Image (cartoon, helix red, strand yellow):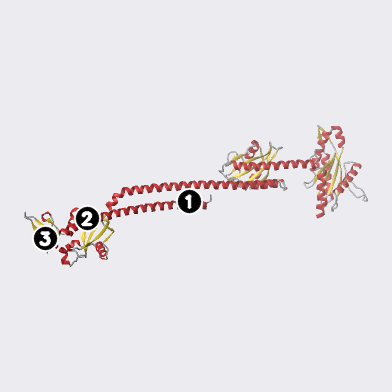
């Protein structure tokens, strides 16, 4: 999964968590508001009950004209009722009774019956008889609303002592009220003032505290479960997404590997030179997405005669390795071990098995894969991996498939070489045969010489005395003589020249671009010298010589058949005029010449 997809995934998870938190918070806030409304509703009910009770008391007192109470009980006579002639009376027993009106009674009840944060009820008015009933700031505002036509008014009020529900209810004057309020000019039906009540909200909230704690605990538990569910879901989605991404990556890697294998197979079947195809296959493999491969590696072919691996292709190897790994004996280092055991050798680091070391070598690992065809070991190819890389079965299968393709390619190449050897080389000496010689001669004498005129020559050789050796020592000895004679002749020419055996004891040499005829004569002299040295055959020493004929192309395109026929004619002249001689071909009109 790329970074942006991961950010989007966890960003969505964070958004879900925030949304869930907001939803639970809204639910908690809504429930809190409902509880607050319940508290206010309870406060309103208590206020209504208190107002109803005090209104009933007021109505009763007003209806009966007042209540007399014993002044000796701590109730002072109301100075605002002094104008009434019967405010104070004495009983026959001598008790002092004083008249108490409704407002005074309500205040006395509130003062005597309540203390602390309880419900308080009193009467108030903008112009009260008693200064004690003067309104406070909130009551003044409420009375103003009642004067606007309302009969009741209430709201939540905050103060130093907490929050309260405060409510007022209008007091309407009746005929009975005039006894006390006549001097104020009040008429029946007018508003005298109001009953004011305040209910503390803290005790009501305290009664709902357990319910609130249970609600808060439930919401927190519900929120926690929801968060856990979201996180678990996100983790599962993340895991499923990773699995899907890994599956997609595996499919893409498999597809890329299939494309790489297809390209490798196509390259193995191409008509490019063998070593170029090996190098290209190595390059494709080192850049395949199958593993954490470095662009370094090498392909070795098995040299059965030396019992060693020979480096034929490499990619990115440092110069010290090119020299030390040009030829690796079986069992040495990782590649030699893979060839010896014929098993894949893996190393995640440079360990004790890595016998080839050099200054400045960096940490790395290896896959060394044997290349086989059937039971035949054909070589080994090695690939570099990053230090600490872990062995992986899937990438090992890929590399084994590459090894199988290389095995088929090398086997076909070896089979082709064997066919080429049989078709174009002499079975006894390993030298080119007549067909290969004529093909090379044709390319040079007819095609190359047409582009640029150069002097070239053909030498035709016949061994003198070979028949006697063959008859005296046998064909096996004669064959060994022919093999060594071919090697001696080959040692006298350059790498660009061609030495071939035509059959029997006849050899032929193509000398390219010799510059002057003397060069051909000098090479012929060298051949005479090396063939004159004794041959050791079955403990016996024998000697042979050679008759050599030379023909030149005269710096112009000429048929190889013509030049071979001319050289053969010159050789025949050399043999008939004394053997162990060299004769240059001349046209019939020219005088024949020779060189001993």
Foreground residue among 259 and 426: 259
Residue shown at 18% from the left, 55% from the top:
109
According to the picture, the residue beneath numbered tag 3 turns out to be 87
Image coordinates for residue 564, horizontal then vertical, percent = 86, 46
The mark lying in front, picked from 1 and 2, is: 2
Question: Quick one: SS at disc 2?
Answer: helix
The answer to whether 59 appears left or right of 153 in the picture is: left
According to the picture, the residue beneath numbered tag 2 turns out to be 53
- Counting residues from the start of the chain, the first of labels 2 and 3 encountered is 2
Question: Quick one: SS at disc 3?
Answer: loop
Instruction: State the separation of the CA atoms marked 1 and 2.
Output: 63 Å
- Counting residues from the start of the chain, the first of labels 3 and 1 encountered is 1
According to the picture, the residue beneath numbered tag 1 turns out to be 10
**Looking at the rendering, which quadrant does residue 36 occupy?**
bottom left
* Residue neighbourhood size for the residue with mark 2, other residues' Cα within 10 Å, grouped as few (<14), some (14–19), many (≥20): few
Question: Quick one: SS at disc 1?
Answer: helix
């Amino acid at each position: 999964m790329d970074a942006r997809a991961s950010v989007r995934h966890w960003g969505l998870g964070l958004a879900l968590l925030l949304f869930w938190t907001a939803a639970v918070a809204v639910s908690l806030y809504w429930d809190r508001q409902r509880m607050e409304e319940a508290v206010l509703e309870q406060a309103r009910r208590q206020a209504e009950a208190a107002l109803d009770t005090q209104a009933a008391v007021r109505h009763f007192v007003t209806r009966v004209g007042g209540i007399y109470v014993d002044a000796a009980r701590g109730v002072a006579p109301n100075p605002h009722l002094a104008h009434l002639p019967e405010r104070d009376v004495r009983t026959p027993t001598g008790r002092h009774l004083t008249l108490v009106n409704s407002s005074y009674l309500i205040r006395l009840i509130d003062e005597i019956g309540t203390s602390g944060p309880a419900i308080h009820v009193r009467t108030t008015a903008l112009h009260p008889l008693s200064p004690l009933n003067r309104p406070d700031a909130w009551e003044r505002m409420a009375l103003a609303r009642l004067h606007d036509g309302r009969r009741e008014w209430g709201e939540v009020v905050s103060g130093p002592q907490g929050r309260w529900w405060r409510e007022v209810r209008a007091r309407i004057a009746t005929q009975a009220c005039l006894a006390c309020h006549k001097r104020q000019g009040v008429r029946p039906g007018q508003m005298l003032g109001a009953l004011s009540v305040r209910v503390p909200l803290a005790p009501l909230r305290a009664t709902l505290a357990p319910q609130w704690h249970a609600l808060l605990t439930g919401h927190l538990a519900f929120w926690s479960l929801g968060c856990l569910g979201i996180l678990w879901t996100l983790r599962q989605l993340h895991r499923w997404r990773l699995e899907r991404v890994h599956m997609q990556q595996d499919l893409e890697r498999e597809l890329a590997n299939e494309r790489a294998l297809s390209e490798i197979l196509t390259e193995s079947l191409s008509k490019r030179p063998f070593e170029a195809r090996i190098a290209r296959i190595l390059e494709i493999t080192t850049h395949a997405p199958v593993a954490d491969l470095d662009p370094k590696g090498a392909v070795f072919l098995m040299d059965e005669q030396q019992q060693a691996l020979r480096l034929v292709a490499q990619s990115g190897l440092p110069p010290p390795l090119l020299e030390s790994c040009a030829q690796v004996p079986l069992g040495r280092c990782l590649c030699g071990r893979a060839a010896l055991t014929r098993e894949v050798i893996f190393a995640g680091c440079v360990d004790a098995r890595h016998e080839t070391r050099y200054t400045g070598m960096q940490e790395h690992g290896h896959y060394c894969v044997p290349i086989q065809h059937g039971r035949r070991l054909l070589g080994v190819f090695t690939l570099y991996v990053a230090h600490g890389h872990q062995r992986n079965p899937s990438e090992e299968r890929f590399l084994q498939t590459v090894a199988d393709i290389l095995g088929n390619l090398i086997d076909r190449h070896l089979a082709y070489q064997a066919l080429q050897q049989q078709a174009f080389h002499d079975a006894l000496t390993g030298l080119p045969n007549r067909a290969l010689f004529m093909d090379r001669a044709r390319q040079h004498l007819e095609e190359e010489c047409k582009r640029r005129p150069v002097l070239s020559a053909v030498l035709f050789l016949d061994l003198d005395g070979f028949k006697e050796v063959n008859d005296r020592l046998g064909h096996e000895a004669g064959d060994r003589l022919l093999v060594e004679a071919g090697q001696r002749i080959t040692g006298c020419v350059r790498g660009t020249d061609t030495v071939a055996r035509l059959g029997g004891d006849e050899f032929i040499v193509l000398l390219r671009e010799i510059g002057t005829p003397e060069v051909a004569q000098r090479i012929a002299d060298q051949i005479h010298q090396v063939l004159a040295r004794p041959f050791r055959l079955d403990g016996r020493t024998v000697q042979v010589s050679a008759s050599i004929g030379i023909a030149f192309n005269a710096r112009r395109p000429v048929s190889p058949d013509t030049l071979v026929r001319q050289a053969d004619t010159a050789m025949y002249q050399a043999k008939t005029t004394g053997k162990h001689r060299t004769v240059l071909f001349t046209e019939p009109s020219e005088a024949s010449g020779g060189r001993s």
